[in-house]
Amino acid sequence: MSKPVLCALELNDEALDEKVLAQAARLAALDGAQLDVVNVLPDFGESWVSGFFEEHHHEKAVKDTTQRLTGLCAKVLGDERNAKVRHLVATGTAYQEILKVAETTGCGLIVIGAHKPDLKDYLLGPNAARVIRHSDCSVFVVR
């Protein structure tokens, strides 16, 4: 068995997320690798923005996001395969947290989607580009 495959999903474009997840699952299956799926929530932390949210907003957001990840994995992969997937929710800056999770899990491959970029981003979105630039492992980009 090889190193885990980390699949980073944004959960805001279901069609792209399904493509990214299906590709990550295929790549993990080729090597008999563990499939980890991650989504990163923004961190409002101690900033003035946090004052606009309920006290337990973050915990609720993590719970809801975990349910969305689990549901998407069950839909795309089926219940049996989904039971073996590690569903991870991180909080912070997307590319930084994806890289931290990749390092923590010791993954050998990150699979990430490339959304329709702005002209300033040209080929890749800013998070995908940063993950590619700073990752210690291979990165597979799904369009």
Image (cartoon, rainbow, N blue to C red):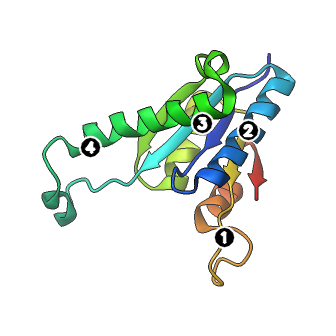
* The label number, if any, that marks residue 103 in the structure image: 3
Earlier in the chain: of badge 2 and badge 1, it is 2
- Amino acid tagged 4: His
Q: Residue at point 74% right, 73% down? A: 123
Which of the two discs, 4 and 3, labels the residue nearer the N terminus? 4
In the rendered image, residue 54, in percent from the top left (x then y), is placed at 14, 49
Cα–Cα gap, marks 3 and 1: 27 Å
The x and y percentages for residue 48 are 17, 65
Instruction: Report helix, strand or loop for mark 3.
Output: helix
Front-most of residues 88 and 66: 66
Q: Earlier in the sequence, mark 4 or mark 2?
A: 2
Q: For mark 2, what is the residue?
A: 22
Is 66 drawn above or below residue 16 in the view shown?
A: above
Say few, some or many: other residues with alpha carbon within 10 Å of mark 1 (under 14 / 14 to 19 / 20 or more).
few
Q: Amino acid at mark 2?
A: Ala
**Residue that carries the numbered disc 4 in the rendered image:** 58
Marks 4/2: CA distance? 28 Å
Give residue 7's position: percent from left, percent from top. Answer: 65, 40
Image position of 71 with respect to 41: above or below: above
Which element type, helix, strand or loop, lies under badge 1? Answer: loop
Q: Secondary structure at mark 2?
A: helix
Mark nearest the camera among 4 and 3 is 4
**What amino acid is found at the position of numbered circle 1 in the picture?**
Lys
According to the picture, the residue beneath numbered tag 1 turns out to be 116
Q: Nearer the viewer, mark 3 or mark 2?
A: 2
Which is in the foreground here, disc 3 or disc 1? 1
Badge nearest the viewer, 4 or 2: 2
Quarter the C terminus occupies: bottom right
Residue 68's disc is none
Question: Do the residues under discs 2 and 1 have CB atoms within 8 angstroms?
Answer: no
